[in-house]
Image (tube, grey):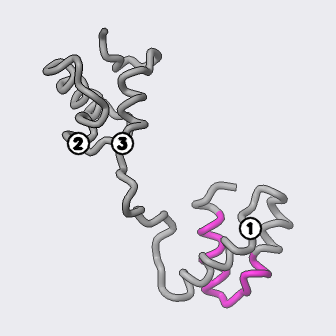
Amino acid sequence: MEKFESRACIKTRALLEVTAQAITDDLVLVHGDQVRKYSTVAKWATLFKDGRESLEDNPRSGHPQTTYTAKNIERVRTIIEENPHTTHDIIKARTSINRFTINEIIHNRHSKFQISP
């Protein structure tokens, strides 16, 4: 069961004043082992009862939301073309792209955006 689906169900049931345990039990009955743990259901039920509207995750601080995108690939490519001996740390400092994504951009041979050697 997808997060969005389970959260929609939790939201509806929580706003109807159904307990987190009853919501969890119903989800397990219908979807089996693919449902969220009770603690997760209880957390989201409380959030919705307290007025939360969104079913989406909140952005996480301290974790840059960089992705393997054409824009980021071009940014890394430009830096490497300026200085082929540049380091991951320099690229990270100039772009705020995390090291994992930088490494993926540089070394992913299956990408149509692969940087030429």
- Report crowding for label 2: few under 14, some 14 to 19, many 20 or more residues within 10 A (C-alpha): few
Q: CA distance from mark 3 to mark 2?
A: 9 Å
Q: CA distance from mark 2 to mark 1?
A: 39 Å
- Indicate whether residue 9 is drawn in magenta: yes
In-front residue for pair 1/78 = 78
Counting from the top left corner in percent of width and height, residue 82 is at: 13, 21
Residue to which mark 3 is pinned: 98
Q: Secondary structure at mark 1?
A: loop
Position of 55 relative to 70 (above/below): below
Quadrant housing the C terminus: top left
Mark 1 or mark 3: which comes first in sequence? 1
Between marks 2 and 1 in the image, the one whose residue lies nearer the viewer: 2
- Indicate whether residue 13 is drawn in magenta: yes
Counting from the top left corner in percent of width and height, residue 58 is at: 44, 66
Position of 64 relative to 18 (above/below): above
Image side of residue 51 versus residue 46, left or right: left
Residue to which mark 2 is pinned: 93
Residue to which mark 1 is pinned: 37
Magenta stretch, residue numbers? 6-23
In-front residue for pair 46/16 = 46
Position of 116 relative to 77 (above/below): above
Quadrant housing the N terminus: bottom right
Q: Looking at the image, which residue is at 38% across and 38% down? A: 99
- Report crowding for label 1: few under 14, some 14 to 19, many 20 or more residues within 10 A (C-alpha): few
Q: Quadrant of residue 39?
A: bottom right
Q: Quadrant of residue 6?
A: bottom right
Amino acid carrying mark 3 in the image: Asn
Q: Looking at the image, which residue is at 82% across and 63% down? A: 30
Amino acid carrying mark 1 in the image: Lys
Mark 2 or mark 1: which comes first in sequence? 1
